[in-house]
Amino acid sequence: LGDHLVHNTPKPTLLTLFGAVLEDANPAERALVLGGLPAPVRAVWHVIGRPRYARHIRRVRG
């Protein structure tokens, strides 16, 4: 199911979903999830995904 989601969801949408998962995670869970990602994917999250998610949430929540 996870592979299907990753391969069939637009990348910007994946970043938003990933941000929502991390937002609800506690620090230990967040570290576990991020630690399981390959280094290039973690870099994409930190450089592109996290700021994009923050902008999205500001627009949604006002």
Image (cartoon, rainbow, N blue to C red):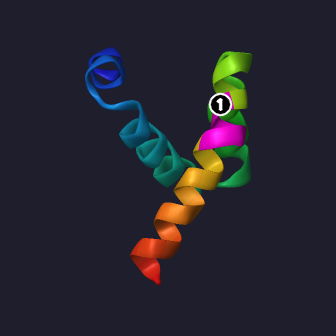
Rendered view: 38 above or below 13: above
Amino acid on which disc 1 is placed: Val
Residue 46 belongs to magenta span: yes
**Residue 41 located left or right of residue 15:** right
**Residue 25 located left or right of residue 27:** left
Q: Is residue 60 something one can see in this rendering?
A: yes
Please rate how many residues cluster around mark 1, counting C-alpha atoms within 10 Å: few if below 14, some from 14 to 19, many from 20. Answer: few
Q: Dividing the image into 4 quarters, which one contains the N terminus?
A: top left
Residue 29 belongs to magenta span: no
Rendered view: 20 above or below 28: below
Q: Nearer the viewer, residue 62 or 1?
A: 62
Picture coordinates of residue 52, whole percent (x, y): 56, 52
| Point 29% across, 25% down: residue | 5
Q: Nearer the viewer, residue 29 or 8?
A: 8
Q: Is residue 25 something one can see in this rendering?
A: no
Q: Quadrant of residue 47?
A: top right
User: How many numbered marks have been drawn onto this rendered protein structure?
Assistant: 1
Rendered view: 56 above or below 19: below
Rendered view: 40 above or below 50: above
Label 1 secondary element: helix
Picture coordinates of residue 61, whole percent (x, y): 44, 79
Write down the region rendered in magenta. 44-48
Q: Given the current orientation, which residue lies at the most extreme bottom position?
A: 62
Q: Nearer the viewer, residue 11 or 4?
A: 11
Picture coordinates of residue 19, whole percent (x, y): 53, 49
| Point 62% across, 33% down: residue | 33
Per the image, the residue denoted by label 1 is: 44
Examine the residues drawn in magenta and state their main secondary structure: helix
Picture coordinates of residue 30, whole percent (x, y): 66, 44
